């Protein structure tokens, strides 16, 4: 048997769309290279994907498996209750994963030879090692986020955490994250740093970040030219790092354009409302602000109305993803208020879920009001669309700082949410500062394109990853 046929990778994301989507892209790329791939979802997410998945038809070496996340079927699994999911996966899914991997690595026709697990599921790496299966970590967040996470033990030791307490100067610079001394403010630290250090969730993340360096190889959805300085700090901590992003751009360069487009639209747990594409067709060139706060972001009704007034007052047309489960409120208050629907008709378009990558690539879109989830940030870069940042959780706070101050491809309005600021910032992104931002964005978008195409670093690193996975068999 040749090596290619024998290599079999088990991909295991943390059960949230922002983690599943890039690993599905990697699954496509590995299958395209002829490797066998098993994609492991939780039962809950698997049910959402099955009616959408033509992936196995396109890729005969791809198959799906599922495993319990340990939560009851009717659990909302939203960001407010993410702790339930994290601790349930750690206690219930972990032993089941051991059984499944033991089975897949010994009994199947093509035994699993390599596990690629999410960076916040170190148990999967440890179990793979115990069972003698090669293990690699996939980090779904940004490298700049990773570096700040890795420095958290030092920040705790120095008594710098938590941030955001009463009277805390959030604009004070953070001096203990090497390489970031002149950029990182206390307010830019990942949101977990705003929690008490004895909080169980805080403790969980600190332990996971310590564990990540136990991996034999780290895979990053980023590219060398975007984060050279940060990567130079992370590099010595791992024996091998593969920067293979933006994965969406690699999909386009590696797999025939039309195929990649049709497949990437299936990489979602939700079905997109495509009527917004027709609406976009009727809008002037680069005039529309696309607004999306990702798959888990939540806002209060008060914040929702501030954004709405800010958008309306800016005078710009807007396409806004308002997820039904994205409005925090007491029972019965989650629905999108009727006046919002009514008042939007003249100038905007609301959808529950958009085909985001296609929207960003549409010529009518001139700005992206985003929460800076790492996938969205990279998608904005690939499409070359200036960003206005309103981060809420995880690495988003640091991503937005990098967008505005390091790459200079957008504006950051974190920690504010009033209609006049929103209006002013939208005007700045779409008018006053448009030229300057677009210039930087064009440069960064070109770097992203180059890295993902033949001769580029991510293109090369994917080849290297595939080669190394095959070698180990
Ligand atoms: N997304 C989408 N349609 C939407 C909103 C989001 O397809 O209406 C996709 C988006 O393209 C991105 C992902 O959902 O790939 C969100 O991931 P990200 O890391 O940006 O944020 P998260 O959802 O993890 O907070």
Image (tube, grey):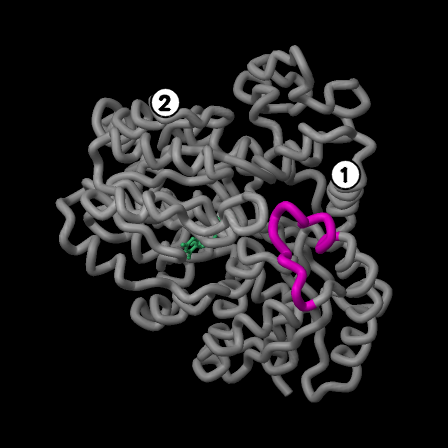
Q: Which of the 4 image quadrants contains residue 365?
A: top left
Q: Secondary structure at mark 2?
A: helix
**Residue shown at the point (73%, 19%) measured from the top left:** 160
Is residue 292 rendered magenta in the image? no
Can residue 231 be seen at all in this image of the molecule? no
Q: Residue beneath label 2, please?
A: 421
Q: Position of residue 11 (x, y in %)?
A: 63, 66
171 to the left or right of 101: left
User: What stretch of residues is rendered in magenta?
Assistant: 73-86
**Residue shown at the point (46%, 84%) measured from the top left:** 57
**Residue shown at the point (43%, 24%) measured from the top left:** 405
Disc 2 packing (10 Å; few <14; some 14–19; many ≥20): some
Which label sits on residue 255?
none
**Residue shown at the point (54%, 68%) measured from the top left:** 27
Q: Position of residue 199 (x, y in %)?
A: 79, 35
Q: Considering only vertical position in the picture, is 187 above or below 138?
A: above
393 and 108: which is toward the camera? 393
3 and 426: which is toward the camera? 426
Disc 1 packing (10 Å; few <14; some 14–19; many ≥20): some
Quarter of the rendering occupied by the N terminus: bottom right
Quick one: label 2 or label 1, which is nearer the N terminus? 1
Is residue 76 rendered magenta in the image? yes
Distance between the alpha carbons at the discs numbered 2 and 1:
35 Å
Q: Considering only vertical position in the picture, is 158 above or below 441?
A: above
């Amino acid at each position: 048997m040749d090596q290619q046929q024998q290599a079999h990778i088990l991909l295991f994301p943390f059960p949230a769309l922002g983690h599943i989507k890039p690993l599905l892209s990697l699954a496509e790329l590995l299958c395209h290279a002829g490797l066998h791939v098993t994609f492991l979802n939780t039962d809950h997410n698997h049910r959402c994907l099955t009616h959408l998945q033509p992936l196995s038809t396109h890729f005969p070496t791809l198959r799906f498996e599922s495993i319990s996340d340990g939560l009851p079927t009717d659990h909302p699994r939203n960001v407010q209750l993410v702790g339930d999911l994290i601790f349930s996966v750690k206690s219930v899914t972990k032993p089941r994963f051991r059984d499944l991997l033991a089975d897949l690595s010994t009994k199947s026709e093509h035994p699993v030879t390599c596990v690629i697990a999410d960076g916040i599921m170190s148990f999967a790496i440890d179990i793979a090692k115990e069972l003698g299966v090669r293990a690699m970590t996939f980090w779904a967040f940004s490298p700049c986020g990773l570096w700040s996470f890795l420095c958290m033990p030092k920040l705790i030791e120095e008594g710098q955490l938590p941030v955001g307490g009463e009277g805390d100067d959030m604009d004070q610079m953070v001096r203990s994250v090497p390489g970031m001394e002149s950029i990182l403010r206390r307010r830019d630290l990942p949101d977990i740093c705003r929690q008490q250090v004895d909080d169980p969730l805080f403790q969980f993340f600190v332990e996971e970040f310590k564990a990540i360096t136990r991996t034999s190889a780290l895979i990053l959805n980023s590219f060398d030219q975007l984060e050279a300085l940060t990567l130079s700090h992370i590099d010595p901590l791992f024996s091998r790092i593969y920067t293979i992003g933006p994965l969406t751009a690699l999909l386009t360069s590696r797999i025939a354009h039309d195929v990649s487009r049709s497949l990437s639209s299936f990489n979602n747990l939700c079905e997109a409302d495509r009527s917004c594409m027709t609406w976009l067709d009727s809008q002037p060139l680069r005039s529309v602000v696309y607004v999306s706060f990702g798959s888990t972001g939540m806002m209060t009704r008060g914040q929702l109305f501030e954004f709405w007034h800010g958008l309306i007052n800016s005078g710009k047309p807007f396409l806004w993803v308002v997820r039904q489960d994205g409005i925090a409120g007491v029972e019965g208050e989650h629905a999108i208020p009727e006046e919002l629907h009514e008042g939007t008709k003249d100038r905007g378009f609301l959808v529950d879920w958009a085909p985001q990558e296609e929207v960003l690539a549409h010529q009518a879109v001139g700005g992206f009001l985003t929460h800076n989830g790492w996938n969205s940030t990279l998608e904005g870069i690939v499409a070359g669309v200036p960003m206005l940042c309103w981060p809420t959780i995880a690495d988003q706070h640091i991503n937005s700082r990098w967008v505005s101050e390091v790459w200079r491809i957008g504006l950051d309005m974190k920690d504010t949410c009033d209609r006049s600021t929103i209006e002013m910032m939208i005007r700045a992104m779409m008018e006053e500062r448009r030229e300057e931002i677009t210039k930087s964005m064009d440069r960064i978008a070109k770097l992203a394109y180059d890295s993902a195409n033949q001769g580029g670093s991510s293109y090369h690193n994917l080849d290297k990853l595939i080669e190394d996975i095959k070698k180990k068999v």
